[in-house]
Amino acid sequence: PLVLASYAIATAAQVCTAAADTYSLMALLRLLLGIGHGLGMPTSLALVAEATPASSRKAMQGLRNVIFVFGSISGAAVVAVDSPDLTSLHWRWLLLLGAAPSLLLGLAAAMFLRESPVFLAAAQRVGEAEGVLAEMRGLNGQPGVDVTVRPPLRPIVG
C-alpha cells in the first residue's frame, strides 16, 4: 500500500539528509521527505475511515491528527534539549533520531496493516477483499457478520 511506500520514502529521505553534504542535496531530500508524507496522509485518512466503525470515526480521525502533531512537538522538544539556544545542534544525529519513528511505524505497518478492502474490491481482487474483511470480522469478535463482497460497477484499472 501507499502507506508503506510513504514510510519507506520518509525514512530513507531522513537518513540521507543526515549524510547530505550540500545545501541543494539537503533541499532535494527534504522535498522527497515531503512527498513521502504527502503520499501517506490521504491514504491514512482513507484507511482510518474504512476500518473504523461510523460511531468512532470522528474520534479516530481526531486521534490520528493528535498523534501527528505530537510527533512534531516531540521533534521540537528533542531539538530544545540538544541545544536550547540553537547554537550547537548535533543536527545530523537529530535527523537520524527523527528517522526512528517512521522506521518503527513502517515496520509495524508492514506487519499488521492490510490493503484496503474497498481498493481490493474495486481492483477485482474480491477474494483478497473478503479475506481482509474476514480478518477484521475476527478481530472485532463478530463471527456472524457477512463479508461477501459485491464487485463495483466500474473497476479500477491496473
Image (cartoon, rainbow, N blue to C red):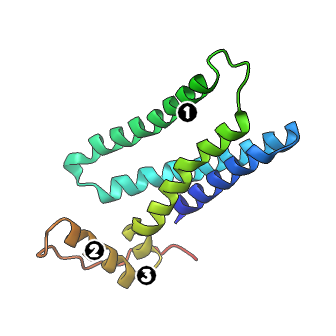
Tag 1, which secondary structure?
A: helix
Looking at the figure, which quarter contains the C terminus?
bottom right
* Residue 75 in picture, x, y percent from top left: 55, 33
Q: Is residue 100 left or right of residue 45?
A: right
Tell me the residue at 86%/36% (across/down): 23
Q: Is residue 54 visible?
A: yes
Which numbered mark, 1 or 2, is in the foreground of this view?
A: 1
Tag 3, which secondary structure?
A: loop
**Which residue is labeled 2 in the image?**
135
Q: Is residue 143 left or right of residue 45?
A: left
Tell me the residue at 41%/39% (across/down): 67
Q: Is residue 116 above or below residue 125?
A: above
Cα–Cα gap, marks 1 and 3: 40 Å
Which kind of residue does numbered mark 1 sit on? Gly
**Which residue is labeled 3 in the image?**
125
* Residue 108 in picture, x, y percent from top left: 44, 61
Which kind of residue does numbered mark 2 sit on? Glu
The circle drawn on residue 75 is 1
How many residues crowd around disc 3 within 10 Å: few (fewer than 14), some, or many (20 or more)?
Answer: some
Residue 82 found in image quarter: top right
Tell me the residue at 23%/76% (across/down): 147
* Residue 65 in picture, x, y percent from top left: 41, 38
